[in-house]
Image (cartoon, coloured by chain):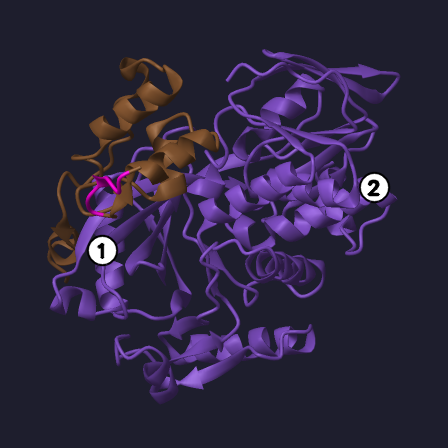
Chain colours: A purple, B brown
Amino acid sequence: MTEEMMKETEVVVLGGGIGGVSTAYCLAKLGSDVTLIEKNELVSGASGANAAIVDLLWRQPGSDLKLGMASFELYDHLTKDLGYDIEFDRCGMLCPIETEIQFEEMKPFIEVRNKAGLPSARLVNRNEMLELEPNLSPSLLGAMWNPIDGHLNPMFAVYAFAEEAKRLGAKIYQNTTVLAINTERGRIKSVVTDKGEIGTKYVVNACGIDAPAIGEMLGVKIPIVPNREQLIVTEEIPNLVRRTLLGAGYKKTVEDGTSWATVAFYANPQKKGNLLIGGVNDFVGGDRRTTFEALQTISRVAIRFLPILKAQHVHVIRSWARFYIHTPDGKPILGKVEGLDGFIMVGGFNDYGMGVGPGAGKVIAELIYYGEPSIPISDFTLARFN
Amino acid sequence: MKRLIICRCEEITKEEIVKAIREGARSINAIKRRTESGMGLCQGRSCERLIARILNEETGLPIEKILPMTRRPPVRPLTLELLGGKIE
């Protein structure tokens, strides 16, 4: 596939993950002439290797929650209006609670979300929790429950946005490397790739974990580092687990003197019946291998929450590690980069890129097209780190 | 085209593999992400060479540039109980 690079375009989007394809799709829909460049193939990074959870419950009240809601609307649009099967299943998210203290702590958590526009979220007691998910351990106290959350197939979602963007006229170049970005009088001028140079007014940096490398080309420091997350997937066990499960207060730090990692619990049933279970997180630079210790920990924690996995001798068929896009304050980086006209960030989604990525793509498209986003993103500027 | 199963675990046909390539997939991993071939119990052991050959036929990419697909533990399916070991 040696296509010749176009000579001119209004907007160049760099990165073929959820942030990039949804930005390209929304721009194309508004009528912009947009070109997306991906170094590898579409969905090669964090969007293609995550836990497939999409939830509103854990969004912060305000713009974060609104970006989540806008994302859900776009997933619904892909599914209901455009006919893509992205396996978007709002089976509900159940967040088991282990102690009385956690139960008390979750009351204000729910209350602020109810007030912020998420009336569906509530606490349930043990009996109701077990009705919703009979195979959870009866030693758990209860859970937070949000019936409108769930999961999707992240790969299918990215391909669907990319297909629609193309249908609306966007150009997508895969296996294309950016070599340099030219500027003129403080404004973006062109992007030089190994397939040619393309003139443009805007560069949208949606490169996920590689966003800092693009920033560096322009002398812009982007404080993103990779956080390794390890997960496992089981054989198909349809209906053994029906909800997206995420331990509400379960987050432990394990140290062994030289290193540390955090351990969380989630279990997410997929359409075919496989269960995704995680996860152990640590900072190990660019190392994407899995470790025996982490897989052992994940298995143990999973059995504690879901004893059925042991009782039914459920098998693990694969493990993997992915990088989530860590920012110092855990919030995304969105919007114009000060001092360089036309350079725009979409990224730093931490561990919830599938949850807010499409909403972020939508507001960035609005920012470029109308000059103003429909959801305020001033909390997410790169400048906050200065 | 005859309905020819390539990935037995996930029941993915040759037609679906070819469609993924025509939509832009240029690696076994990309074909896997589009079709779910190689995501089942055998983790691509029986289909990866077949898929590599189809990709070679469709695009001319040399086989040695296609194989192998990414390998991840466990080598074969393992119970969570065994992987987790003894729980104190």
A148 over A382 or under it: above or below: below
Amino acid of disc 2? Tyr
Q: Residue at x 63, y 46 (%)?
A: A332
Which residue is denoted by mark 2 in the rendering? A369
Between tags 2 and 1, which lies in front? 2
Main SS of the magenta part reads loop
Left or right of residue A385, residue A39 in this image? left
Left or right of residue B76, residue A338 in this image? right
Q: Position of residue A369 (x, y in %)?
A: 83, 41
The subunit letter for the residue under badge 2 reads A
CB under 8 Å between callouts 2 and 1? no
Dot 1 lies on which element? helix
The quarter holding residue A29 reads top right
Say whether residue A258 is visible: no
A156 over A43 or under it: above or below: below
Query: How dense is the environment of label 2, judged by Cα within 10 Å: few (below 14), some, or many (20 and up)?
Result: some
Q: Residue at x 39, y 74 (%)?
A: A97
Label 2, label 1: how far apart the Cα atoms are: 48 Å
Which residue is denoted by mark 1 in the rendering? A299
Q: Residue at x 60, y 53 (%)?
A: A356
A226 over A177 or under it: above or below: below
- Residue range in magenta is B2-9
Left or right of residue A292, residue A91 in this image? right
If you read the primary sequence from the N terminus, does the residue marked by circle 2 or circle 1 appear first? 1
A117 over A217 or under it: above or below: below
**Front-most of residues B13 and A331:** B13
Q: Residue at x 67, y 57 (%)?
A: A67
